[in-house]
Amino acid sequence: MATRTQTVHTQTERVVEAPGEHTLPLAKESLEWVEQLKTLDARLSMPILKTPSLGRLEYVLSLPGSMFGVPLYSLIVLPYIVAAVAEVCAGVPDGCAVTIAAVVLVIATLFWAFCMVESVSNAPNSDDNGVMRAFHPLGKKLGTVMTLFGPHTTVWVMRYSSGTAGNAAAYYITVYYVTQVVVELVKTLAKRARPVIKVKEELQTVSRKIPQIQHFLSREHAMHSSFPSGDAAGSTTFALIGLAVTPPEYRLLALPIWAFFPALSTFARVYFHAHFLGDVFTGHALAAAVALAFLTRPTLVGTPYEFSWFAMCLWEIPVVLGWAFCQQLKPKSAENIYNAENLVNTLSFRKKSA
């Protein structure tokens, strides 16, 4: 009887253990497959990662990192451009969206250029450089206020020009909001190290005219945010919404112009060691999926010409909650990335640099 009971227990143990014996190797194989993909991605990215410094051209290449990724620019500057294009294409009489957009774009570009030029004159590993001020020009508190209320100001300024311009700005901002929350969630779960960290040894001999960008990306808050690229996603959002507000008969002619921005972002983000190619293309794909989900459902969410500021506010609620949720999932760090000098205390920075 004891022998029979022992046999039953042994058989039961085998039945219970069998799934575990097969599951662990399968999980291990899956992880190995993912690592192989990452290794392949790194190899394919190496030609761009190791591209020799392009000198002053880096000032242009640095633009996608601001215009399509930093809220100050992507949520406040770019909506003016989309709104201006929509107003012109709709043939709105007496609109001033183009003039407003031109002034805002010139100011933003000059400010970014000033920050990049100034950063070159400072120590590469210093926090007191133009890159930090370009990303956080008003510091944490004022920057947060501007990020939350700046887009609403943009919409109402454009509505002063015309309802068409205001609606197009609100539509672009909403699609950008949703896209970046999706990207942030994937970033939080993936936690992939950036090239500047992952292949640091292989890139030691590769210099850049603006090395502060790599220093910024090496900080604890940013080093594991490689996959996917939020900047690439932002450039695709901008291009697709811009193409959507372009009249159908002119879209083929306008396609190379709008496609230039994702293409520039693809090269620039890898060139500055911020992302691998896989990160960039995944960002493009996620942005395209979100934009097409909006654009192909006009009866549900409206068109860029009909989208209201009130609709933007409704979309903003789940977006802010989703973003806050992603931040809670991230490990807390004692490092304060806003200790760097910014425009609020530029005077003290000048005195320190003198």
Image (cartoon, rainbow, N blue to C red):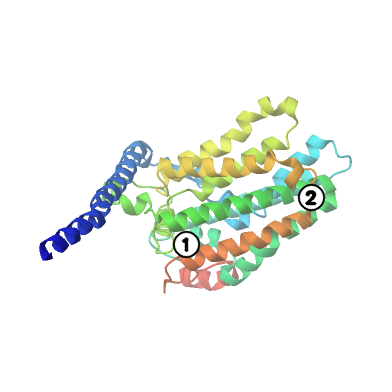
- x and y, in percent, of residue 190 in the image: 41, 54
State left or right for residue 330 relative to residue 19.
Answer: right
- For mark 2, give the secondary structure: helix
The residue identified by callout 1 is: 129
- x and y, in percent, of residue 108 in the image: 64, 52
Upstream in sequence: badge 1 or badge 2: 1
Q: Nearer the viewer, residue 53 or 290?
A: 290
- For mark 1, give the secondary structure: loop
Check contact, mark 1 vs mark 2: CB within 8 A: no
Q: Nearer the viewer, residue 115 or 13?
A: 13
Relative to 221, does residue 295 appear above or below in the rendering? Answer: above
State left or right for residue 338 relative to residue 203.
Answer: right
Q: Nearer the viewer, mark 1 or mark 2?
A: 2
* Pointer 2 local density, CA inside 10 Å: few below 14, some 14–19, many at least 20: many
- Amino acid type of disc 1? Asn
* Pointer 1 local density, CA inside 10 Å: few below 14, some 14–19, many at least 20: many
The residue identified by callout 2 is: 166
Q: Quadrant of residue 87?
A: top right
- Amino acid type of disc 2? Gly
Q: Quadrant of the N terminus?
A: bottom left
Residue situated furthest left in the rendering? 3
- x and y, in percent, of residue 158 in the image: 79, 51
Q: Is residue 60 visible?
A: no
